[in-house]
Image (cartoon, helix red, strand yellow):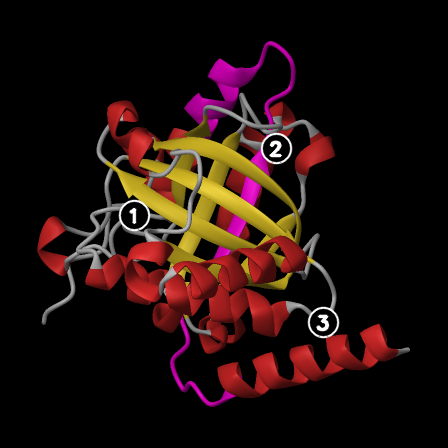
Amino acid sequence: MKQFILAMMYVFSLNTLIAQEEEEEVWRVWYMKPVQGKAEQLQKGLKAHVAKNHGEGQWPEYYYDVLSGPNFGSLMGWSGPHTWKDFDERVRSQADVDHWNRYVAPYLDNSSTGTDFLVFHPELSFDRPQSDGPWPPIFHLSWNYIGPGRGGDYMDVAKSQVESKTKNKSENYHRIYHTASGSNPDAWLYEYPVESMEELKKSTAVGGGGGWEKVFGKAKADELRQKYQGSVKSRMREIIRERKDLSSPPPPPEEN
């Protein structure tokens, strides 16, 4: 019962925090697994579909090859940044639906049809400078699956990570999202941007912690490690690489 109450308190506080943000950044994400032997046909159909229905000024969709993890060999789709209101106002044309059903759907393995809605947390993120452009070609994704009622501890650790990286002048940038709705509502996503596979060493080093002991001292660093280990039940990591040929044009860089 205690765990249930803590979980409800966490969900309520998180939803209250999000509700206070008028323009929260929302992303829809999904995986597309090709039918065995039909990857080429899927990509050909998707390329034509995006060009026709998701070009400049249209609803954006960005696709990535999944290079590692349980979804290896699939495409990962992202649509955003949106607000929740954008999804209310979107009207998908019948021509769009018909084109998808004719040129894309026949080549999809229906075992991977789920979709998640992720909400970006700028206060927990250590983002790249805007001058670096909208995003790099590769992302290292780290999915963290936390236990019920442990969201507060997890967010404390994430905030300390930002403080530590800032003070240490780290270049290991990351963005953090939580799953607002999807297959696992206790999932949080660390998204590490890199320019090449070689740069993955920034986000794959053994030990983690972002230099906690240097910034906070050993006692505080040990406390943060215990909070992290106590809140995270399991993790999954995957590398994704952009497919510009299958994607909408990137958005213009934000003005400072």
Q: Secondary structure at mark 2?
A: helix
Write down the residue under mark 3: 149
Label 3 and label 2: CA atoms lie apart by 39 Å
For the residues bearing labels 1 and 2, Cβ distance under 8 angstroms? no
Q: Amino acid at mark 2?
A: Ala
User: Is 117 in front, or is 11?
Assistant: 11
Q: Name the spot of residue 235 as percent of width and height, x first.
A: 61, 43
Write down the residue under mark 1: 55
Residue drawn 32% across and 52% down? 211
Q: Is residue 241 left or right of residue 144?
A: left
Q: Secondary structure at mark 1?
A: loop
Q: Name the spot of residue 256 as percent of width and height, x first.
A: 9, 72
| Disc nearest the viewer among 3 and 2 | 3
- Disc 2 crowd, CA 10 A, few/some/many (<14, 14-19, 20+): some
> Compared to 14, does 58 lie above or below?
above
> Compared to 196, does 184 lie above or below?
below
For residue 4, which quarter of the picture?
bottom right
Label 3 and label 1: CA atoms lie apart by 42 Å
Read off the magenta span: 19-46
Query: Is there any visible trace of residue 126 in the rendered image?
Result: no
